[in-house]
Image (cartoon, helix red, strand yellow):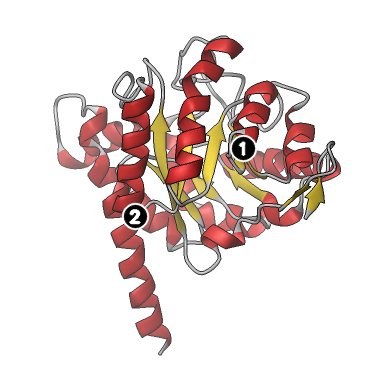
C-alpha cells in the first residue's frame, strides 16, 4: 500500500496479479480516428466501452485504452483531445469490466487523469522520454508501468532505423529505463518492458527480436510485453511465405499475429497485446495445458 498526497492509501499494482499464473492477454481499445487497424470504429465512448466489454468476454485479462495513434507517421493530438477521448471510456471500463484497465499514453497529465478515473497501469511507448513527469506520476499512484523501446517518436521512427545488434541495443535501452523507473519510485513488481515491435524497426529487426526474445526476457528481469498485433511486418512476411502478390490488409493479419503470440509466450513473454483476443486467449490456455502434460 502507498499513501498519495492526500494521505489516502493506494494499493500498489503488481503484474503478478495478471500474468503470474499464466501469460496475460491485453485487449486493445483504440479511441482514435486514425489507428492503423481500427481507427474510427470505437471513437464514440459508448462503442469503445462496448468493445472493451466484448474483449473481456472473449478472454482479455486486462484492457489498454488509447486516445492517440502511435502508428508510423501519426500526428500528435492535444492533451485536451486525448483526455476527452479516453477518460469517459477508462472510467466506465474501470467500473464495469472486472479486469485491470491500462492507459496507453505518453503524457503525464493524461496518465494522471486516467489513474484518477480508475486505470491502474500506464502503458508508455516512450518509456518516460517524452514527458519528464511520467515516472513520478506513475510512482505516486502506485500504478503498473509498461515501458517500451522506440526510436524517436511516431512521426519519424520508421525513417531508416539502424542497429548494429538490435536485441542488445533494445535490451540496453530497456535496462536503462527500468533503472530510471525504479529510481523514480515505481515498485519492482509494477514494472514491465516492451521491445517495441514495429517502433523504429524494419521487418528484419522485428523478426530478429522475436527470434531472440528469450534472451531479452532473461536480460530485463521483469515481465516482457509483446505487441505484434496486425503490424505491417506481418503483412510483409505473409507475402513472402504465402507467395501473395498484394499487400495484406491489417485486418487479415490475425493468423500471423497468433503465430507470433504462441512463439512469444513459449519463450517467456508474459503479456501479449492484441486486437483479436479470443484466439490468443484460447491458444495460450491450450499451450498451458500442453506444458502441464509435458511436465507430468
Q: Categorize mark 1 by other alpha carbons within 10 Å: few (<14), some (14-19), many (20+).
A: many
Placement of the N terminus among the 4 image quadrants: bottom right
Work out how far the residue at label 1 is from the one at label 2, CA to CA, in angstroms. 21 Å
Which one is in front, 295 or 216? 295
> On the picture, is 209 further left or further right than 184?
left
Residue lying at 64% horizontally and 29% vertically, measured from the top left: 111
Q: Categorize mark 2 by other alpha carbons within 10 Å: few (<14), some (14-19), many (20+).
A: some
Residue lying at 35% horizontally and 84% vertically, measured from the top left: 293
Under tag 1, what secondary structure?
A: strand
Using the image, tell me which numbered label, if any, was put on residue 122.
1
Task: Provide residue 176's location: percent of width, then percent of height.
Answer: 76, 40
Residue to which mark 2 is pinned = 59
Task: Provide residue 31's location: percent of width, then percent of height.
Answer: 41, 24
> On the picture, is 101 further left or further right than 12?
left
Q: Is residue 155 visible?
A: no
Task: Provide residue 85's location: percent of width, then percent of height.
Answer: 47, 19
Q: Is residue 196 above or below residue 189?
A: above
Q: Is residue 248 above or below residue 238?
A: above
Residue 71 falls in image quadrant: top left
Residue lying at 50% horizontally and 33% vertically, measured from the top left: 90
Residue lying at 40% horizontally and 81% vertically, measured from the top left: 292
Under tag 2, what secondary structure?
A: loop
Which one is in front, 188 or 67? 67
Circle nearer the N terminus (1, 2): 2
Using the image, tell me which numbered label, if any, was put on residue 238.
none
Amino acid at each position: 500500500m502507498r499513501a498519495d498526497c492526500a494521505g489516502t492509501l493506494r494499493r500498489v499494482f503488481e503484474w503478478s496479479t495478471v500474468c503470474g499464473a499464466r501469460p496475460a492477454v491485453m485487449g486493445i481499445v483504440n479511441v482514435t480516428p486514425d489507428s492503423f487497424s481500427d481507427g474510427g470504429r470505437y471513437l464514440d465512448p459508448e462503442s469503445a466501452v462496448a468493445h472493451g466489454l466484448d474483449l473481456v468476454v472473449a478472454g482479455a485479462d486486462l484492457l489498454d485504452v488509447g486516445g492517440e495513434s502511435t502508428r508510423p507517421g501519426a500526428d500528435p493530438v492535444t492533451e485536451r483531445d486525448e483526455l476527452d477521448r479516453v477518460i469517459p471510456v477508462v472510467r466506465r471500463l474501470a467500473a464495469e469490466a472486472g479486469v485491470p484497465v491500462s492507459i496507453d499514453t505518453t503524457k503525464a497529465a493524461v496518465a494522471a487523469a486516467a489513474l484518477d478515473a480508475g486505470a491502474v497501469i500506464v502503458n508508455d511507448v516512450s518509456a518516460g522520454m517524452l514527458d519528464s513527469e511520467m515516472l513520478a506520476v506513475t510512482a505516486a499512484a502506485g500504478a503498473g508501468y509498461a515501458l517500451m523501446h522506440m526510436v524517436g517518436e511516431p512521426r519519424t521512427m520508421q525513417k531508416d532505423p539502424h542497429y548494429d545488434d538490435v536485441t542488445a541495443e533494445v535490451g540496453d535501452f530497456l535496462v536503462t529505463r527500468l533503472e530510471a523507473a525504479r529510481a523514480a519510485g515505481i515498485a519492482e513488481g509494477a514494472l514491465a518492458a516492451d521491445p517495441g515491435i514495429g517502433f523504429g524497426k524494419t521487418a528484419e529487426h522485428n523478426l530478429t527480436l522475436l527470434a531472440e526474445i528469450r534472451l531479452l526476457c532473461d536480460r530485463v528481469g521483469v515481465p516482457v510485453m509483446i505487441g505484434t498485433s496486425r503490424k505491417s511486418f506481418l503483412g510483409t512476411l505473409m507475402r513472402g511465405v504465402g507467395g501473395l502478390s498484394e499487400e495484406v490488409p491489417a485486418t487479415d493479419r490475425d493468423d500471423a499475429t497468433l503465430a507470433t503470440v504462441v512463439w512469444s509466450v513459449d519463450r517467456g513473454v508474459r503479456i501479449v497485446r492484441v486486437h483479436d483476443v479470443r484466439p490468443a486467449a484460447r491458444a495460450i490456455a491450450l499451450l498451458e495445458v500442453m506444458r502441464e502434460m509435458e511436465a507430468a
